Image: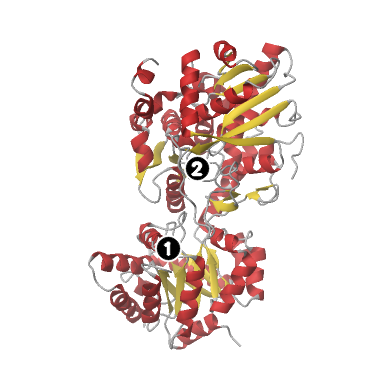
Amino acid sequence: MLNPISLVFKKAKNEKRPALLTYTVAGDSSKKQSLNILKAISNYADILEVGIPHNTPVADGGQIQTSAYRAIKNGIKMNDIFKIVSDFKKSKNSKPVIFMGYYNMIFQYGENKFLKKCKKSGVNGLIVVDLPWPENKIFSNKCKKNSINFIQLLSPTTSNKRLKSITRDSHDMIYYISMLSTTGGKLKVSPKKILANYNKIKKISPKKNCVIGFGITEKTISNFKKADGLVVGSQICKEITRSLNNRQNPVINVSKVVNKLRKKIS
Amino acid sequence: MKLKKRIPVIDQGDKLGFWGGKFGGNFVPETLKKPIEDLEKQFNKLKNNKKFLKERDKYFKNWIGTPTRFIKLNNLTKHVGGAQIWSKVVSDANGGAHKIYNATVHCLLAKRSGKKVIIGDTGAGYAGKMLSMAAKKFGLKCKIFMGAKDIKRQQPNVKAMKKNGADVIPVYSGSQTLVDAVSECMRYWVANCDTTAMCVGSTVGPAIFVRICGWSTSQISRELKSQLLNEFGTIPKKLKLYNCVGGGSSSFGFWNEFMDYDKKQVEFIGVEAGGPSKSKRHAAPLTYGSKIGILHGAAQYVNQNSDGQIEETESISAGLDYPGISPLHCFLKDAKRARYTAASDEEALKAYQIVTKYENLRPSLEPSHAFSVAIKEAKKFSKDTIVIINSCGDAYKDRGILEKKLGKKYVKSN
């Protein structure tokens, strides 16, 4: 049987569209609100990336940093984050959940305890920004044993040799970072070039579901319809910030944004 | 955990860059793997290349002004009563601190690899000032990331950076100090690593930066060793080397050449920043038993909460105000080669007053931490014990803080 993440990609492929992946930070701006955002956007998104906020993020741009600092300031703890996911998973139209975060949070929780808790709460996949290959070999095997998808990252600086080794060691899904940038950077490379790199990865590893992230927004998303999946993060975090500043309801505004994104690629 | 003899400590890491199997490493985003690998290859090749070493030594000698003085502090020795107190006046180096060694080496490497821009982080402003000097010298564009709080409290160095033509980019996130400056600098590198070289300002960050910095500052102990031989004809039987420890670049460089000596003969004492005596916050992860965690690409002892969020630090000295500590020092601590302790803000200020009262030497707030512990301990030592403090920075940059804390006369009279 296919795992929930692969099932989603299969379904999207049948509908001749890329899967839509969203990224929001757990606990932004409160536990309750971030749960409500997840529930609302899962009407339109296929996979929900849930960010584990960290206060020394080395790969996140301003928008996601703002969301993360807001969540930490409001007192979010690792156990609250697991609770948000398990509550979300109990809701009617829940979708697969991928945690995205930095290794220190996992390290402090304890790798084994962390994976056990992921399984129990219904986390389907993990992206660990600062645990690259080959450093992640042992941990990614542990994930596999726990039926959790460890998602390897690839970037424009990844050499061909590395590309082959990483895809060989990857699970069902891989994540291509579109350009040299932190999250939320303006798309500074042409979609054509990004897709060429994407195709190179698909050629090496045709069976793995490959998603593209970084610089994907309402404006740019329709250029990448050929991809297996697309990740939007910073634009959503920005919308939460904007809503809070204007004293509007982020849940409604964010789900409007995600609905629009979905329409652009359907 | 054990140190190996006759192998430089910077080269004692394993394949993945871990010292003692657990400190250091490369916890970096995929994007940085390639530039880090390139830098590793370049450095491993050049560090034994005679032509490169000659070039380095030429700039160290003619531009940085090596060797820096090694002097006996006669008045202080008399005042304290006990061990002989000496100082290695590294603040003699061009720019006024040890940060010039690492900055120069990084610029030489950047130039050779054809990079046009070099970026760096800074706390006290010395790493930034030196990088801006070296960048100017070698014709590279320079950007310095600095916490907004540090920009306010270290104005003389900020002015120097700007004068050297560097862009000083204020960092407003988090505690607005060194930890955030390093994060922001790494983020900038993630987005620009194809055209830009990065210089990490201390023996922290991904393993290659730890190694390059430690290799560069080791100039200090190379000089000291020959100065000791000149002065005493041999390495003294009881030698104690005191150094402040923030990230750990000056202390590592001050000790490196003496690693293989028995610690009964050459003892290393690292002094961390204990923060204000009334505050629970500090920047002394080794002294106060912080847990191992990941910060800026490396596993190390680091101040953090139970979840793994990095904790804010507090210290009067911007250069020591860092929640983590070099993997090299974690290794030296667990291998029991070095001993670590802390001095509070107040103790450092008092030491500054004592040193400036008795000697024509003006250590910045960072080495004042080391002076504080050295003065306290020297009392108890025999007269044939040689205590040496690395005066690794000059107090000019601390004028504002010293005036506020001690009054105008401490600034004017010096």
Badge 1, how many Cα within 10 Å: few under 14, some, many 20+?
A: few
Q: Residue at x 48, y 82 (%)?
A: A89
Q: In this view of the protein, which residue sits in the foreground, B332 or A46?
A: B332
- Locate residue B370, reporting x and y percent: 55, 28
Q: Residue at x 40, y 38 (%)?
A: B142
Pointer 2 chain = B
Could you say which disc has been placed on residue A75 in the image?
1
**Residue B164, relative to residue A57: is it above or below?**
above
Q: Which part of the image, by quadrant, shows the N terminus of chain A?
A: bottom right
Instruction: Tally the marks.
Output: 2
- Locate residue A196, reporting x and y percent: 46, 67
- Locate residue A242, reporting x and y percent: 27, 65
Q: In this view of the protein, which residue sits in the foreground, B79 or B296?
A: B79
A116 relative to A223 in the view: left or right = right
- Locate residue A110, reporting x and y percent: 62, 64
Name the secondary structure under disc 1: loop
Instruction: Place residue A134 in its image quadrant.
Output: bottom right
Q: Amino acid at mark 2?
A: His
B43 relative to A182 in the view: left or right = right
Residue tagged 2: B282
Q: Amino acid at mark 1?
A: Gly
Name the secondary structure under disc 2: loop
Pointer 1 chain = A
How far apart marks 1 and 2 lie (CA) works out to 22 Å
Q: Residue at x 57, y 58 (%)?
A: A159
- In the rendered image, is residue A169 in sight? no
**Residue A10, relative to residue B21: is it above or below?**
below
Q: Which part of the image, by quadrant, shows the C terminus of chain A?
A: bottom left
